[in-house]
Image (cartoon, helix red, strand yellow):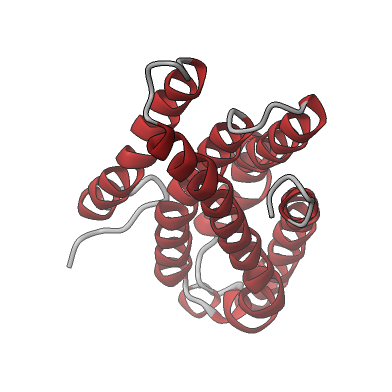
Amino acid sequence: SAVVTPGNINLKTTFTNIVILLPIVVASMAVPMLMHNRDTTSAIIRDVVAFATPRCAVIANGMFAGALVFVSMVDIPAVLPHLRRSQRILWWTTGRNFMVPLGIGSIMSSTTAAFTYEQNATRAAWILAAGETLFVLLWTCFVMVRGAIIPLLDLRDAKDSAHGEMLERDLEVLVRRFEAAHNVRVFVQLAAFATIVAVALSPDMR
């Protein structure tokens, strides 16, 4: 079987996620141009864009927040402490390959939705939500990866060492460290989702 390392990248999964994400990126680049050139853009296209993009942003951000909450409520207490090293690496890489495109899609859809509104306050709310999700990705990349994730993935299995009890305690400490850092992501992304829901319930979007 193939050797799994913390830096392992599933190219097939990554390529699939990029293909899924590509239409969102293209649409995000096209929408500001379409909304800006109102005189040359079909009213039907503008209406479809104005209707679809905010709702896509709500769905994407809701999925992102829900996935993070699931990790907090299920994975961390019930799954992660019981995984062997190879399983922890698989758990992380699989989650990363799903969450990164979803997070980027959330940012792009929220930013795109901002261009469908004339009101500065509404635009600011969408951009704030995009900024909060961007913070989650940056926090994961620059704080969690080195401080919590790599040590957790590098830790040897207790069964494979003469210092099993010590390694089990180390695993418990690292899981708690991961949980503390992860809870920051959960709080910020829930704030982003709450911001978007508040905008979605406003009269502008109904």
Judge by depth and name the residue closer to the eye, 153 or 121: 121
Q: Which residue is at the far left?
A: 1
Camera sees residue 30: yes
- Figure label count: 0
Residue 192 rendering spot, x and y as whole percentages: 74, 48
Identify which residue is drawn at 59% across, 74% down: 80
| As drawn, 112 above or below 87 | above
The picture quadrant where one finds residue 107 is top right
| As drawn, 5 above or below 47 | below
Q: Is residue 25 left or right of residue 119?
A: left
Camera sees residue 167: no
| As drawn, 186 above or below 35 | below
The picture quadrant where one finds residue 146 is top right
Identify which residue is drawn at 69% across, 26% down: 118
Q: Quadrant of the C terminus?
A: bottom right
Residue 76 rendering spot, x and y as whole percentages: 66, 73
Q: Is residue 81 left or right of residue 190?
A: left
Judge by depth and name the residue closer to the eye, 15 or 44: 44
| As drawn, 161 above or below 148 | below
Residue 204 rendering spot, x and y as whole percentages: 73, 45
Identify which residue is drawn at 56% across, 59% down: 59
Identify which residue is drawn at 46% across, 34% down: 46
Judge by depth and name the residue closer to the eye, 96 or 171: 96
Residue 153 rendering spot, x and y as whole percentages: 52, 57
Q: Quadrant of the N terminus?
A: bottom left
The picture quadrant where one finds residue 86 is bottom left
Judge by depth and name the residue closer to the eye, 88 or 93: 93
